[in-house]
Image (spheres, rainbow, N blue to C red):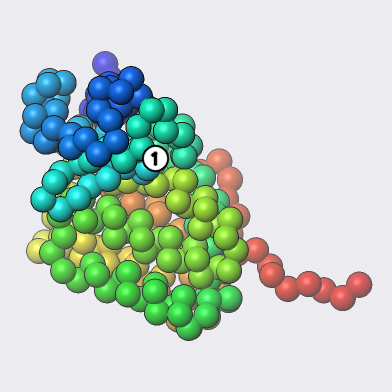
């Protein structure tokens, strides 16, 4: 029997494939306002969260855009390129996505602590502080991704930022799969993530690469546990950031 998350991912992929086909075949041309989430959910026989995940994938590929008061609008029809990694299709793919993120985002935090300029730090803090307000599910995902990309920018290495941007659909889909976040006392999901992010921000502000590396790793591991509901034993892990100094020969 398929796990609940596996089934939800399959449904989301079915909706995504159906919407993409309608756009690619010209049924919905550029500028077309798409049906509402409620209408699409009824059309495909799925829940609104499943539809939302498919729309997130399309938006991350630059095919649709969400406009206040207009819903989702097609902005790149007729075979628009897929600017991302392969979509997540099951829980194993989610685990792989987190494994990959753990290899790059911890170093990104460490490099940002070492190299970040005042404007980079200001952008990171600004993205972090937005978690103080009440957030919708959609806003939460967008702001969380913005925070991680701000850290990637702080590395001064455009490849970190590019890679995080390409992982947009994988990251946002993982967030959508959390579902109803279990409250810890009176703590909301945003408050929990805000506290985890705060440790990363403090380490970057102090220029402590090791602390930034460790705080990011802890945050990603806790995020993975919230999404999956279980821990994944590591096969291997590096214990600290890359040594950026060079020794004289």
Q: Quadrant of residue 16?
A: top left
Q: Residues within 10 Å of mark 1 (few under 14, many from 20)?
A: some
The kind of secondary structure element at disc 1 is loop
Q: Residue at x 46, y 66 (%)?
A: 151
Q: Residue at x 39, y 74 (%)?
A: 123
Q: Quadrant of residue 156?
A: bottom right
Q: How many marks?
A: 1
Q: Which residue is mark 1?
A: 61
Q: Residue at x 45, y 80 (%)?
A: 119
Pinpoint residue 193: horizontal percent, then vertical percent. 28, 62
Pinpoint residue 163: horizontal percent, then vertical percent. 52, 50
Pinpoint residue 128: horizontal percent, then vertical percent. 31, 70
Quadrant location of the N terminus?
A: top left
- Asked if residue 48 shows in the view, the reply is no
Q: Quadrant of residue 209?
A: bottom right
Name of the residue lying farthest toward the right: 249
User: Up-down: is 151 above or below 225?
Assistant: below
Observer-nearest of 69 and 119 = 69
User: Up-down: is 145 above or below 93?
Assistant: below
* Image-based side of 213 in relation to 141, left or right: right
- Asked if residue 66 shows in the view, the reply is yes
Observer-nearest of 64 and 93 = 64
Quadrant location of the C terminus?
A: bottom right
């Amino acid at each position: 029997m398929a796990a609940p998350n596996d089934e939800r991912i399959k449904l989301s992929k079915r909706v995504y494939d159906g919407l993409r086909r309608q756009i690619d075949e010209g049924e919905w041309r550029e500028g077309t306002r798409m049906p509402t989430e409620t209408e699409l959910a009824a059309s495909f026989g799925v829940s609104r969260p499943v539809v939302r995940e498919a729309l997130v994938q399309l938006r991350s590929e630059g095919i649709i855009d969400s406009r206040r008061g207009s819903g989702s609008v097609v902005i790149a029809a007729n075979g628009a390129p897929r600017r991302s990694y392969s979509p997540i299709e099951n829980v194993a793919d989610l685990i792989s996505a987190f494994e990959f993120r753990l290899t790059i985002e911890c170093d990104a935090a460490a490099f940002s602590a070492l190299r970040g300029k005042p404007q980079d730090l200001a952008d990171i803090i600004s993205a972090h502080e937005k978690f103080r307000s009440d957030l919708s599910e959609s806003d939460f995902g967008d702001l969380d991704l913005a925070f991680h990309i701000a850290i990637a920018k702080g590395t001064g290495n455009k490849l970190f930022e590019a890679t995080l941007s390409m992982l947009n659909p994988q990251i946002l889909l993982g967030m959508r799969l959390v579902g109803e976040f279990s409250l810890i006392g009176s703590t909301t999901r945003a408050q929990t993530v805000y506290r985890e992010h705060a440790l990363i921000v403090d380490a970057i502000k102090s220029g402590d690469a090791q602390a930034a590396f460790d705080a990011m790793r802890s945050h990603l591991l806790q995020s993975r546990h919230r999404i999956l509901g279980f821990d994944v034993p590591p096969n291997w892990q590096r214990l600290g950031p890359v040594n950026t100094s060079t020794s004289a020969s």
